[in-house]
Image (tube, helix red, strand yellow):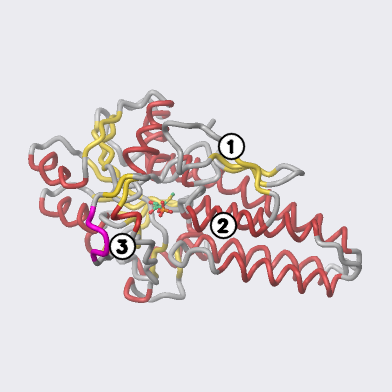
C-alpha cells in the first residue's frame, strides 16, 4: 500500500510528491507550520490528502503546545486552524477537515474535559479517525464505481486522483479503477500528463505501474485524438469541490476532457467522497479557483521554457458543468441528475 501521509508521535510523515517518480523520499514534518508549507508547495496534494494532512498538522502542534489551561490551548488551536485554512482555497476537503477538528475541540469541552492532555488526546484521535475514514470511504467508492466500468474497458483519467491524492491505498478516480480490477474485470488506463504540475505523467503513471495496472501516458492535447480513434470507453476523474447542483471543480484541463467526452458520447464520471460536496455553494460559479505561481508554467523544474518577463495565467482548477457528468460516484452510492436532489440525499444520508 502506498503511504501518502502517516501520523507518527514525532510528526507527520509524507512522501514528497514533488520528486516522484524519480525519487521516493519521505519527509517528517514536526509542526503545523511545516505541514502548511508542505500543502502550499504541493509536497502533498489532492483534495482528501490535503484534508487529512491538515488535520494531522493541527493535532500535532496542538499536542506540542506548552499551556496549562484549556482556554489557552484553544487560542493556540484556533491559530493553527486559521493557518491551515490559508494554504489552498479550492479543495473543500481542507475546510471540511478543519471543521471536523473544531467540532472535536467543542465536543471535548462539552464532555467536560478540563485537562489539557485529555483535549490533546481527543484531537489526535480525531485526526487519526479522519485518516482511517478516508481509506474506508475510498474503498466503498471504488466498489460502487467499479460496477460502472465494463470488463475490458480503457479508462481515461486526468491529474492524479489515486492513493497519492488521498490518505493512501485506493484513491477516488483510481479507486474506481482498482474497484473494477478487484471485481475481476480487465481494465487499462490512459493518463493525461496534466500540465503544468504533471500529476498524470508523474504520479498516476507511477502508482498504476506499481499496482501492475496497464497505463499509457499521453499529453493533454492528445485526448481528443484518442477519443476520436475509439480508444477510450469511459472517463473517470476526481474532484476538489462539487457544488450543490453537481458542477465539479477539478484539475485544470478537466473541463476540456468533459467537452471532448460529450462530443464522442463517452460517459464522463466524477468520483469523490461526500466530504468533497459543498452544499453551501449552489453552483460552480461560487467555487474559488486557485491561481498558482507563474513559474509552474514557465519552467519544468529548473529548466526555463518561456521568455523571461512573459505574462502567465495559471489557474489550478476548472469547473465542469453538471450536464457533462454522467454520474457522481461517492462513498455512499452513485448520484445521478438532477444532482441538487441526489447529492443532498447522499450528503445528508
Ligand atoms: O493541485 P492538486 O494536485 O492538489 O489537484 C488535485 C486534483 O485536482 C485531483 O483530481 C482532486 O483533488 C481529486 S483527488 C482524489
In space, the residues marked 1 and 2 are separated at their CA atoms by: 15 Å
Front residue of 175 and 55 = 55
Q: Disc 1 on helix, strand or loop? A: strand
Q: Look at the image and tell me in which quarter the N terminus lies.
A: top right
Task: Tell me which residue sits at (37%, 66%) in the image.
Answer: 291
Indicate which disc residue 314 carries: 3
Up-down relation of residue 205 to residue 307 (above or below): above
Residue that mark 2 sits on:
37
Judge: label 3 CB < 8 Å from ligand 1. Answer: no
Front residue of 191 and 335 = 191
Give residue 72's position: percent from left, percent from top. Answer: 83, 73
Residue that mark 1 sits on:
26
Q: Which residues are magenta?
A: 306-310
In space, the residues marked 1 and 3 are separated at their CA atoms by: 28 Å
Give residue 181's position: percent from left, percent from top. Answer: 38, 29
N-term mark: 2 or 3: 2
Whether the magenta-drawn stretch holds residue 124 is answered as no
Amino acid at each position: 500500500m502506498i503511504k501518502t501521509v502517516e501520523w507518527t508521535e514525532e510528526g507527520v510523515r509524507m512522501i514528497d510528491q514533488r520528486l516522484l517518480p524519480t525519487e521516493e523520499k519521505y519527509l517528517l514534518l514536526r509542526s503545523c507550520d511545516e505541514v502548511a508549507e508542505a500543502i502550499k508547495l504541493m509536497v502533498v496534494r489532492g483534495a482528501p490528502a490535503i484534508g487529512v494532512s491538515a488535520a494531522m498538522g493541527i493535532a500535532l502542534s496542538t499536542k506540542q503546545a506548552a499551556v496549562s489551561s484549556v482556554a489557552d490551548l484553544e487560542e493556540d488551536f484556533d491559530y493553527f486552524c486559521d493557518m491551515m485554512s490559508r494554504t489552498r482555497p479550492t479543495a473543500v476537503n481542507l475546510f471540511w477537515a478543519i471543521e471536523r477538528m473544531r467540532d472535536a475541540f467543542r465536543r471535548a469541552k462539552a464532555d467536560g474535559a478540563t485537562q489539557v492532555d485529555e483535549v490533546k488526546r481527543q484531537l489526535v484521535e480525531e485526526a487519526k479517525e479522519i485518516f482511517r475514514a478516508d481509506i474506508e470511504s475510498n474503498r466503498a467508492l471504488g466498489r460502487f464505481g467499479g460496477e460502472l466500468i465494463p470488463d475490458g474497458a480503457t479508462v481515461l483519467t486526468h491529474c492524479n486522483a489515486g492513493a497519492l491524492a488521498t490518505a493512501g491505498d485506493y484513491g477516488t478516480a483510481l479507486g474506481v479503477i482498482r474497484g473494477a480490477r478487484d471485481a475481476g474485470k480487465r481494465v487499462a488506463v490512459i493518463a493525461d500528463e496534466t500540465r503544468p504540475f504533471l500529476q498524470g505523467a508523474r504520479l498516476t503513471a507511477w502508482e498504476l505501474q506499481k499496482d501492475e495496472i496497464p497505463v499509457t501516458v499521453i499529453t493533454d492535447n492528445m485526448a481528443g485524438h484518442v477519443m476520436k480513434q475509439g480508444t477510450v470507453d469511459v472517463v473517470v476523474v476526481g474532484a476538489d469541490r462539487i457544488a450543490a447542483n453537481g458542477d465539479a471543480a477539478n484539475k485544470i484541463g478537466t473541463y476540456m476532457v468533459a467537452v471532448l467526452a460529450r462530443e464522442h458520447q463517452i460517459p464522463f464520471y466524477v468520483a469523490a467522497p461526500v466530504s468533497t460536496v459543498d452544499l453551501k455553494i449552489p453552483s460552480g460559479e461560487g467555487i474559488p479557483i486557485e491561481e498558482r505561481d507563474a513559474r509552474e508554467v514557465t519552467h519544468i523544474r529548473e529548466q526555463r521554457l518561456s521568455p523571461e518577463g512573459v505574462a502567465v495565467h495559471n489557474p489550478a482548477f476548472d469547473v465542469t458543468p453538471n450536464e457533462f457528468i454522467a454520474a457522481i460516484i461517492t462513498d455512499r452510492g452513485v448520484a445521478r441528475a438532477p444532482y441538487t436532489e441526489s447529492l443532498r440525499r447522499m450528503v445528508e444520508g
